[in-house]
Structure formats: C-alpha cells, structure tokens
Image (cartoon, grey):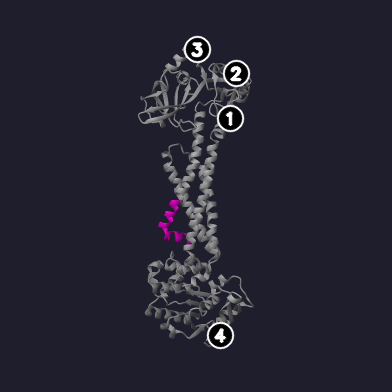
Amino acid sequence: MANGPAPLISFVDVSKHYGEGETRVDALRGVSFTVAAGEVVGLRGPSGSGKTTVLNIVGCILAPSSGELRLAGEPVFSEGRWRRSDLRGLRLATIGFIFQFHNLLPFLTSTDNVALVLRLAGESAGTAKRRAHELLAYLDVGHRRNAFPAQLSGGEAQRVAIARALANRPRIILADEPTAALDSQRAQVVMDLLRRVAVEQQAAIVVVTHDDKIVNRFDRVLELRDGLLI
Amino acid sequence: MNLAIRDIRHNLGRFLLTCLGLSLLLAIVLSMLGIYRGLVAESLTLARAPAVDLWVVETNTRGPFAEASRLPGDVREAVARVAGVTEAGSLTFQSVETETTAGKLRLYVVGFEPGRPGGPAAIVEGRAIAQSRYEVVIDRSAGVAVGERIRLGRREFRVVGLTARQVSSGGDPVAFITLRDSQKLQFELAPPAARRELARGGSEATSDIVNAVVARVSPDVPVAAVADGVRRWKHLAVLTQEEQETVLSRSVIERARRQIGLFTSLLLIVSTVIIALIVYTLTIDKTREIATLKLIGAPDRVIVGLIMQQALAMGAIGFAFGVAFILAAKDGFPRRVVVESPDVLALGAAVVLVCILASSLGVRLALKVDPATALAG
C-alpha cells in the first residue's frame, strides 16, 4: 500500500451475499482494502471470486450486505445503507469507468463521447468540447476526434473510453478488463496511460484483470478467491 | 447535446423507414376522416345545389333524401303563392343504371324545371338544358363527354353540359334532366305493360308527381315564419335548409359516421401499439448504452428524454409524411376525400398523445436497466 494521506478508496470489512437460507451465496466475505491516490491496483481471481462485485460496490451500483465504503474520504455506505442519495451524481463527479468493450455510445463521435460526461456535469458546450479535444490529444487519438466508435480500432476506442473516464478529472478510476480485447502491445500502451493518469492526476485506479501480460504493471495485486482476499 | 437527435442522425435510414411505415398508418387514419368528411360534403352538395331556403315534402316524412316523399305536381303553384316565397321549383329524384361505352353507369337523376330553383349549381363545361326534352347535364365523374348520348330508361339523352362534384350521398354522379323527362322516366310504362293496363280497363295514372318542392324566401321575411305558414297545410311537411342538412348529416350518413369513427379509433389504437412496440424495441437495442449512461452518472431525465424525444420525432415525421401522402393521393380515391385543417390538427394532437403514451413502455424499461449491465462482458 502506498504511504501518504487518507486513501481514496476505503473498503472495510465488506460482505455481500445473494439470496437467503439454502440458496444463499456469499460473493464477498469481510473483504477490506484501501487504495491511495496515485496507486494502480490490480484485482485478480477466477470467475465467481467476487471481482465484479467489488467493482460494482466501489462504483456505487451495488449495495453491500454489510461493511463500510468510503470514497475520497467521504462515507458512502455504512450501517447497512447508502449515506448519499444521489449516487449517480457521486459517480459523475468522483468515479471514472473503463469497460472491457469500451462501451462508447455508437451514435456519438469520439469528441462527443468525451464531452457528454462534461455536459452532464454542467460544463458549457464550448468548454466540454475543448477539454474533450485536449484529452483525446493527450491520449494520442486527437486525429480521430470526429470518428464514430465503429470507425475506430480496438486500441483507439479504448483510448477514447479512457479519455471519457478522465473527462471530469475523477479521483477514482475503475477499469473492468480494459486490456482484454487488445493485443499485447496495445495492452501495454493502455497500462502506460493508466499509470500516467494515476501519477499526474493523483487518482486511485482499480483494474479488474485476468490478463497475465499486464500483471507486473500494478503497484499491488489483490487476489480474490471465493469472496475472500488472499 | 441532444442524444435523441444524434441517435436518429446516426441511424437515419432505419429511422426514416420506420417513420415511413408509421406515416402510411397515419395516412390511413387521415383518409378515414377524409372519407367521412367527403361523405358529408357529397350528401350536402346535392341538398345545397338548389340554394333554397325551404324543402316542402309529403306530410309525416323527412324526404326526399332520408325517406320517400310524393307530392302532387301542383303543390309548386301553391307554395309559390305563399307570402314571402320568391321562387319555387318542383324536383324529382331517382336512381338509374345505364350503359355507356365505358360500361355500366349508376346515376342519381334529378328532374327539375329549367328556370326555377333546383337545377345544377354551376356548369363547368358545355351549357345548361335549353330544350324541354332529352337533354342532360351530368357530373364529370360519370366519365361522359359533352355531345355523347346516354340511355335513361327507354329514351336517349344528349349530354349538353357537365358539372363538378355533384354526386349523391351514395357517391353516384348526379344527372339533371327536365321535370317532364324525369316524370316520364319514373312513371311511363313500357309499351307491353301499357297495352295490358288498357286491356284490363285501367286508365293511365297521373304522372304529375314530384318528390319535393323547393322554395326561396325573400331576405326580408323570416324563413321560420314562412315554414310555419306552409306547415298549417296538413298534407305537407316543411324542412328548412338547415333541417334538411341536419337530416342528411345525422340520419342518412349516421351509420357510415359511426362505422368510420369506430374504424378510426381502432386504427389509432393499432398505431399506439405499433409505436409502443417500435419504441420498446429501440429501447431494448439501447440497453447497454442506457446502462452506460446510468453508470457514468446521467440523470433519468436524460434517458427519458432520449426515448421520448425519439418517439415524438417518429410521430411528428410519420405524421408529416402521412399528411403529405394523403394530400397527394386524395384525388385518386374512388370517392371524395376531404382533408380539413381541424381534422389534421386533431390527429396531430392525438399522435403527440399516442407517442407519449406509447413511449411510456420504453421509458419504464429504460428506468429499470441496471447500470451494472454496462460492466457485463
């Protein structure tokens, strides 16, 4: 764990189960970890180990059964309930998501996909467009700013998706298998980018991955098995 | 940033094709309304053609259009002498089927007295009837030309003039002939039948029967007062022009009105279901995008706006295409289609309501989409 100020993600004794009685499935069992600013943490484990559940809980789209979640120092879940009512607002302001299959909106250009997040946050059209162009240039896809997702290569689309995730300067970035659809070379480029973002923007980054070729690119790797950290 | 417009622009071909399908449906709805308005207009055309104030018919009837009415021919003289009446004319009405070079032709024959009220409103080609016998002015929808000869009953008539949009409530072209010709057409027996009638000692019955007498009233005299005066004669009934039009629009075409109204309602329900299914399918297609929007923090109003604006755009474009289609095609219908602005506006308002109603299913689905779907592989 990195030394420094309060962690940006604080996941304390979190459990999550589905169903009750004989049908009860424990997805997470008292999992605790923290991620500090500037850290890139990998989250690994076999299918069904609870990786996606961790990501969903940190992303505030799934409520834990028990435990506590703090994001950027703010208590978000504790005592069995969400402490904030506008979880979408929290996500918009604090969390950036990167998906396995980029999930860009197919009817928006690269610029508009990035600018959309800024427009949702209340930025003017001009500011949003300017910032989108800056980000696309920063991620070396500035020349593809007017292209639609279907016109982009896998690597370009993933970089546009990263630009979208960075648009609001989130303190936390959650990436779900961001290199799974990429070849080895492009996977390294994406990891380089995430590392650069973590350092330059002092963001906490959690990457769920099965990809062995990038496992040495993390500050730490959390291994999950049967809902437990090992 | 309007997501609905961006999505439409991105899938413009598919969207326009959907709108085109919807427009055909809405064009049918509008054509049904137009057909109904056409029915009313056609029925009233014949009643309005003489431009009269009073219709004198057989007592206890609402003739001559709603039911049969028979009056002695001399009623016209009696009506003409009523104070306030400026002009009066006798009319007969009958349906006749004849043959032309183009095939069978069904006509609604009006017998009138030239120079008196009841003749064709306007002649668009040729001239008015000038001879007392065997001339006919006919509506151009019959497809006959000036100078042609057509057979009515046992006589041949020469077409001397054409009218426009003079048809009966059944859609048959109206043919105007003289009263004398029409009475012969209606009552003259065929020679064998006449011979038989004479042989059994009968005498030729009077043929001076008319179906209605129409009258124009001086502008200085209240029409109702004149009507009340005529009503005092027990053997006659009187309808004002307004009453005659009410009888036609309320009674004669009432069933058609209800039938078309029911069909139009059914079509609107079908349109609602189709729009709902289209919007629902479009929403299902966008499940992942909606989940992504939710995940990145888009509020519900953005997602609802995306779906509802597309539904409204679809309705608006479909409606515009539909109106354009029916305006272009209305003259090709076998019967008159009258597209009136209030009907178009009412249908437009109905389409807006239908779109809002129909999109509620898609909105409901969208609001239920789990943002975690975006993270699923």
Mark 4: which secondary structure?
Answer: loop
Q: Real-space Cα distance between discs 1 and 4? A: 92 Å
1 vs 4, front mark: 1
Q: Which of B273 and B245 is in front in this view?
A: B273
Q: Which residue is drawn at 52% across and 60% down?
A: B362
Q: Is residue B23 above or below residue A184?
A: above
Residue with the mark numbered 4:
A5
Q: How crowded is mark 4: few (under 14 residues within 10 Å), some or many (20 or more)?
A: few
Residue with the mark numbered 3:
B203
Mark 3: which secondary structure?
Answer: loop
Q: Real-space Cα distance between discs 3 and 2? A: 37 Å
Q: Mark 1 lies on which chain?
A: B
Residue with the mark numbered 1:
B243
The boundaries of the magenta stretch are B1-21
Q: Position of residue A5 (x, y in %)?
A: 56, 85
Q: Residue B3 lies in magenta, yes or no?
A: yes
Residue with the mark numbered 2:
B83
Residue kind at label 3, given as amino acid type: Ser
Q: Mark 4 lies on which chain?
A: A
Mark 1: which secondary structure?
Answer: helix
3 vs 1, front mark: 3
4 vs 2, front mark: 2
